[in-house]
Amino acid sequence: MDNNVLPAIDVDRLEVSYGSQQVLHGVSLSVAPGEFIAILGSSGCGKTTLLRTIAGFQKAAGGAIRLFGRDVVNVPPEKRGMAMMFQSYALWPHMTVLGNVGYGLKLRGVPKSEIHKRVASILKMLNLSGLENRKVTNLSGGQRQRVALGRALAIEPEILLLDEPLSNLDAKVRIQLRSEIKSLQARLGFTAIHVTHDREEAMTMADRIVVMDAGHIVQVGPPKDVYDRPNSPFVASFMGAENTIDLEVHSSGQDVEIRTRDGLSTPFVGQIPMGSLTAYFRDDAASLHDPDARVAGSIILPGTITQRTYPGGHYRYVVAIGDRHFTVTDDEYHALERPVGLRLPVASLHLFPSDHPQGGIHA
Amino acid sequence: MARPSFLGLLLIAPALVMIGVLFLYPLGFSLSSAFTGADGRFSLGSFHKAYELYSTDILFTLFIVIVSTLLTGVLSIAIAGILTLSETPWLIAVLRNLYRWPLFIPFIVAAQCMRTFLAKNGLMNNSLVALGLMEPIQATSFLDWRGIIITFVWKQVPFVTLMLAGAMASIDRATIEAGRNLGASRLRVLIELVLPQVAQTLLVGLVLSFVTMLSVLSVPMMVAGSQPTMLTVDMAFRINSYGDYATANALGVISYVIAGAVAWIYLRHNVKREAQI
């Protein structure tokens, strides 16, 4: 079998049900060897179910899962040859660090002295040297998850499954481990599937992002593609474009005319879909100007600032336009209650045909 | 400070009185009676007599209770393990609904059931003969030490399983999945990963079972013949037939010592565990 040709993981029209409730509706996904995939979605979208079905902890109701061409749908989890990291670390509290990390090797009949040697080198790689005989219950959260990572990597798996392993850690340790996992993956070359609901985590770690919603995969692509060109309102708002505004686009002569619900009209030259649209935009896509400014290629909406926060690096404002509220980031300090123009560059709006009228902050 | 402590004492007084009247006084009385000779002085005569007459029964009692405890442990681990790790829903459902029944049956009823079940022409042998698995001539009565052990195990397995299955259900499920994910079979997961996490509960269950079985009178009396038999039967016999409280109390003290030894093993294990944490 040639591993370079066959996908490491090939999920084919996978269906999973909990009793009568179907959780995955024919999910298909192909992961190349050495690829890092992040599955992103809100809770209950089926992302963890997908991962657990790949690992074998959840039975499939239909479809196939092939690992390097071998169908494993009916193979028990212990025979699938993958490693997994869990949100709760899932370390065995009655064992030492050595016992935990070396357990997979012990199962494979590796002699004791060899286990010692290999565990030592793994602990060195994870900056845990010298902790072999420490009880895992005496370690910090970050150390515990490192031990769990070492336990998973000790068996030199071809596939590593990560079930939100960083979400119990504090922010600093999380970012540190994020880059450690990423660089280990680059060095050791395993294929990884990482389930997370943290968009930034998915973006920074993955080669490709898979966005799931209600048991379906809704978009797959490199982080930048999914971020810049979401293919649905769901993906747009999930990727942070949480402001929405309804627009009417008509042709007027050679140009097009963009009209808001308030009747404000802006001429525009360029490619744009026609008809009733909903625009999704991130708070950093918009900026603050004078209410009566005119900027080519941008819609300017007059409004007032109702709230200002400073999250660091820039200010975040809530701007009221009519009865709707939008969030905007801007480098400049502006006074509250000040009339401003909210500038929306048309090119950075994600436009989708409106199915129902809405406006303001989406999420 | 004085008033609250007086009030506190008043609150626990009923409990203290109950313990004193119903437990400490009889215990002290039987202890002193065991060590008192016919002339009212300190004497080990009762123990000497107890040993002379009943040393076989002491060993028999130890044998029955230790074997029963071990078998109870093995069966409870098996049932709780299946309840925790099985992937066959109907098997789990059937086991879950069946295993608890003996909990609600008193020892004396269990003993009576076993008499009809294990006798030479009892339900078990008749069924085996009817199924063609055994010739009628081969049928033997199990109403001896085997009957006692079967009854004890049948009665105590549900209790230990109940504790053990509860403890297994409350460990982090991911620790089980992590083991299987790395390639451990379910049996290895049970023995190497699940059991060590619930060892404390298993130990408590087995210690309680041991002490319970040590003190049951009805089962050895009803299920097995008179020789050899368990210490409870001997104690009842000494009192009912001879009014010989001294020897009965000496046998009682020997029972205390056996139970105390088991409790000591449990406590020592507990202390060791706490020292580790």
Image (cartoon, rainbow, N blue to C red):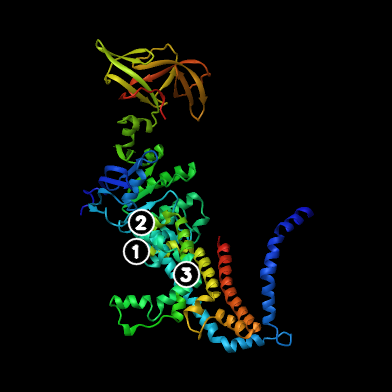
Q: Residue at x 57, y 82 (%)?
A: B234
Which chain is disc 2 placed on? B
| Picture disc at residue B181 | 2
Residue depicted at x 40% and y 51%: A85
Provide residue A194's location: percent of width, then percent of height: 36, 45
Tell me residue A329's x, y (percent): 45, 25
Give above or below for B121 relative to B167: below
Q: Nearer the viewer, residue A49 or B263?
A: B263
In the rendering, which numbered label is found on residue A108?
A: 1
Q: Nearer the viewer, residue A15 or A56?
A: A15
| Residues behind callouts 3 and 1 on a single chain | no
User: Local crowd at mark 2 within 10 Å, few (<14), some, or many (≥20)?
Assistant: many
Label 3, secondary structure: give it: helix
Tell me where residue A355 sits by quadrant: top left
Q: CA distance from mark 2 to mark 3?
A: 37 Å
Amino acid under label 2? Asn
Q: Check disc 3 and report the residue beneath it.
A: B155
